[in-house]
Image (cartoon, rainbow, N blue to C red):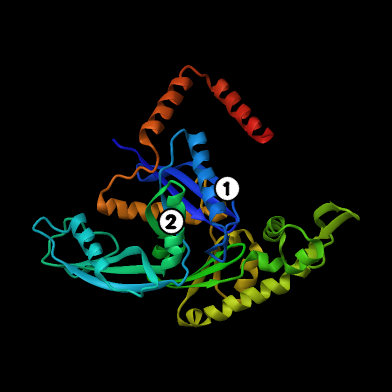
Amino acid sequence: MPKELYASLELSEKEVRVLVSECFNTRFNILQVVRIPCNGLKNFRITDREEIVRAIKEAKKEVLNKIGSDLHKAILLIPPVNFKRIALETEIIPDEKGLSRDDVLRALNKTLEIEIDPDLLVINRVPVSYTINGITSKRIPYKEISDSARIEIDLLCADKNLTFDYVSLVEESGIEVIDICLSNYAICKEASLFEQSTNRNIILLDINDNYTNMSLIVKGKMMTCEVIEKGIESFAKDLYEKYSIPFVKMSRLIKYNGSRDIESKDTVYAYNRNKGNVNISLSELNTAILPYVKDYLDNIAEMSKPVIESKETFFAVVSEGSDMLLIADILKEKTGCEIKMIHPDSIGVREANLISLYGSLFAAKEMIDISQKNVCCLDEFEFNNVVDRKIFEDEGETFTTKIRTFFKQYMDKEND
């Protein structure tokens, strides 16, 4: 049986991320996560093409070194810049055997004929619901016999030029893009937000270091998305001007120590500067960031007000922002809504900013199952040889030997 080996790739302002996984019995087993520092993007636009290509090639090389198989295909994540949803309904006539995958695929292919804004590109084609014999379902009612069936489909669109630029970068690096996926749609798939939006509105806050994607999910549909050019680093303005600590360290300091406490003198960060030791207390940290956090969340609350007034609503906070409990505390006070801080919980992808990478696997798998195509993003022959060799090497090992080998590998990695 052919292996289902998936890889997803994301370009961020600070790094290139690659996630490699094997789908087995409907579950994704994480094989490797690769992060390569890269500064070739600014506000989603390419500022240094060569730098990004270098980082992607380095990530490709690391996959080969660690897994032993070449990465030659990937699913590419696209930011929801200039997001637009187009809602469609299409009718199909099943044959005498009932509704099939081919019927659904035919309905999806009909959407390719739709004319859209020339500045936009359809990133995801999403089957929202299926109505057959007067019954509406979110799942495909396979083999249901009827004279006709109606399928509701959402076309999720984003900036065309940006998408082409991202794809060209990846393919220039020697990786074929087999599918593209909006980052906010991928997050919804991983966190099961569409299923949770039946009776409540959901406002998704994808909070990153330099920007925030704010999406509205209603009754299983992604309705709107706004990109806010502010993130966690915007809270650090005063601290950076005073202490000149790199934003990478400052971001971690804010996420894990930020609170309403402006009295505590406990030291949260200490370092040595030319003029001597510098200590930052919890009160100094919070006094510096609280005005910016409150201003940022005031804007979020104001933008959310019509949605909150229309129906019961909760906020889902993901990515870097989900590590910052201060956001949940203040946002709940300002909106009166439930705040859910969401992290991926599968082994290998528990870091907050991997949620969209992991979710893109589920989005791609759904469409691949409909088309019934086999996908293998790695060289399967090489991968099988590596697995067979590992099995052969492990034969005869005792449990104690395996534990000793594990700790040796861990210590070697730490020393590196």
| Residue furthest out toward the right | 275
- Residue flagged by tag 1: what amino acid is it? Ile
| Residue furthest out toward the front | 50
Which residue is depicted at the point 44% across and 35% down?
69
Query: Which is more toward the observer, 342 or 374?
Result: 374
Query: To which residue does mark 2 refer?
Result: 168
Q: Is residue 46 visible?
A: yes
Q: Residue 219 placed where, x, y %?
A: 38, 71
Residue 33 vs 224, above or below: the answer is: above
Q: Residues within 10 Å of mark 1 (few under 14, many from 20)?
A: some
Answer yes or no: do the residues labelled 1 and 2 have beta carbons within 8 Å? no
Which residue is depicted at the point 61% across and 70% down?
230
Residue 66 vs 47, above or below: the answer is: above
Q: Residue 120 placed where, x, y %?
A: 39, 71
Q: Residue 402 placed where, x, y %?
A: 55, 24
Which residue is depicted at the point 56% across and 68% down?
212
Q: Quadrant of the C terminus?
A: top right
- Give the secondary structure at mark 2: helix
| Disc ID at residue 36 | 1
Q: Is residue 322 left or right of residue 150?
A: right
Query: Which is more toward the observer, 238 or 92?
Result: 238
Q: Is residue 220 visible?
A: no
Q: Is residue 84 left or right of residue 112?
A: right
How far is disc 1 from disc 2 in space, using C-alphas?
19 Å
Q: Residues within 10 Å of mark 2 (few under 14, many from 20)?
A: some
Residue 106 vs 344, above or below: the answer is: below
Residue 329: name its quadrant: bottom right
- Residue flagged by tag 2: what amino acid is it? Ser
Q: Earlier in the sequence, mark 1 or mark 2?
A: 1
